[in-house]
Image: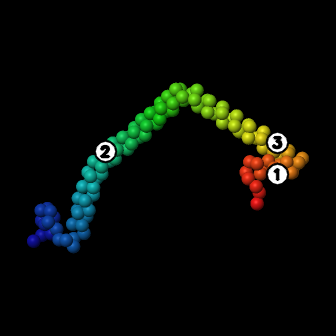
Amino acid sequence: MDPRSRESRGTREPDDPAAQNDDIGLKHSARVARNTHSNRLELRQMLRTIFTIGALAVLGLFLLSFVFGILKGLIGLALFLLGLAIRIAIVGLIVYLVIRIVSPETARRLRERWSGPAV
């Protein structure tokens, strides 16, 4: 039988290089079709992720503005008291250091009064 007649019918020998190329071509065309479908799904999934992140960012900004708008007075008061406590601690530290330099015995008594006897 003529090899060309086999080619025309689409039946080739497995060892024939043209048969292997046809298989690759078929697999490639099937892969292209599958990739086109999966590309649409990936695009849709990617856009959904981007829009979800954007929506969460806008929601977070809205909640932050709400919290700082409603609780502005309480947050301001807490920050004021924190600043005041830090200033008092710094002044106390400076006074203690001056007493320690000028009168070490008085500094030792203060330390024992507030933290217990030294070992």
Mark 2 lies on residue = 40
Residue 71, given in percent of the width and then of the height, sits at 54, 28
Please give the name of the residue rendered at 88% of the width and 48% of the height, measured from the top-left corner.
103
Front residue (pair 94, 35): 94
Mark 3 lies on residue = 95
| Left or right of 75, for residue 33 | left
Front residue (pair 8, 84): 84
Name the amino acid type tagged 3: Val
Front residue (pair 98, 22): 98
Tag in front: 3 or 2: 3
Residue 28, given in percent of the width and then of the height, sits at 27, 57
Q: How many marks?
A: 3
Please report contact status of discs 2 and 1: CB closer than 8 Å, yes or no: no
Question: Residues under labels 1 and 3: Cα distance?
Answer: 14 Å
Label located before the other in sequence (1 or 3)? 3
Residue 51, given in percent of the width and then of the height, sits at 40, 38
Please report contact status of discs 3 and 2: CB closer than 8 Å, yes or no: no
Q: Determine the residue located farthest toward the right in the rendered image.
A: 102
Name the amino acid type tagged 1: Arg
Residue 113, given in percent of the width and then of the height, sits at 76, 48
Mark 1 lies on residue = 108
Residue 7 seen in render: yes
Name the amino acid type tagged 2: Arg
